[in-house]
């Protein structure tokens, strides 16, 4: 017996006349249209329900987007003309406390962070039970640290005081289901983001 963990390709078995053999493009169109044959019953022994994965995935994607806004405006919740954000709907416990403390520290030092997500790849979804999950991602970011306040006024531009050129990290998110939503209770990047470099 061998136990493995990781991604697998979906496996479908269905009858298709040889004279109407599907091309890659035709198969993709069929999938996009939702015309998918049922998975073989034996796959239920190791497949995670797609809806659970999608909810976890969407939570992390939205959290990342809200974190970018929160660190730019040094506000955990807020809105501008482009969008609204609210870190409190994605984080809980110590992770929320640490994030709020970091944002307050930036504000006290009159600093803010410009984060740019270059890439995000989901590596694994590990549902411990109906209420707990661990999700692992590979993320690529580039960050800039500024002094001042975000402004598009050329007379009052913030000063760039630090940068992290493109870096990659594997991030483990510990998540708990609360009511109808998933919340992130712990975030562990490996390796940690690099130290700020002088611009």
Image: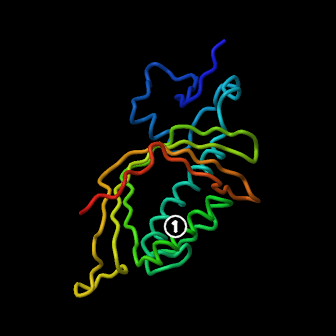
Front residue of 79 and 112 = 112
Snapshot colouring: rainbow
Count of marks overlaid on the render: 1
Image: 121 above or below 100: above
Tell me where residue 193 appears, x and y as whole percent.
41, 51
Outermost residue, top direction? 1
Front residue of 146 and 76 = 146
Picture quadrant of residue 151: bottom left
Q: Could you tell whether 145 is left or right of 124 in the image?
A: left
Residue at mark 1: 102
Q: Residue at x 47, y 78 (%)?
A: 108
Q: Could you tell whether 87 is left or right of 150 in the image?
A: right
Tell me where residue 42 appears, x and y as whole percent.
69, 22
Front residue of 45 and 128 = 128
Q: Residue at x 51, y 56 (%)?
A: 61
* Disc 1 secondary structure class: helix
């Amino acid at each position: 017996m061998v136990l493995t963990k990781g991604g697998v390709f979906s496996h479908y078995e269905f009858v298709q006349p040889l004279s109407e053999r599907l091309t890659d493009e035709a198969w993709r169109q069929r999938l996009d249209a939702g015309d998918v044959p049922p998975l073989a019953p034996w796959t239920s022994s190791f497949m995670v329900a797609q809806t659970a994965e999608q909810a976890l995935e969407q939570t992390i994607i939205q959290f990342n987007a809200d974190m970018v806004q929160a660190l730019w405006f040094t506000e955990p919740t807020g809105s501008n003309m482009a969008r609204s954000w609210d870190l409190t709907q994605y984080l809980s416990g110590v992770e929320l406390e640490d994030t709020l403390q970091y944002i307050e520290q930036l504000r006290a030092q009159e600093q803010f962070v410009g984060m740019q997500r270059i890439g995000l790849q989901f590596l694994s979804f590990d549902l411990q039970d109906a209420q707990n999950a661990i999700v692992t991602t590979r993320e690529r970011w580039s960050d800039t640290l500024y002094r001042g306040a975000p402004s598009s006024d050329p007379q009052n531009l913030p000063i760039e005081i630090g940068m992290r050129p493109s870096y990659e990290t594997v991030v483990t998110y510990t998540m708990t289901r609360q009511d109808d939503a998933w919340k992130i209770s712990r975030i562990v990047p490996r390796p940690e983001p690099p130290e700020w470099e002088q611009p």
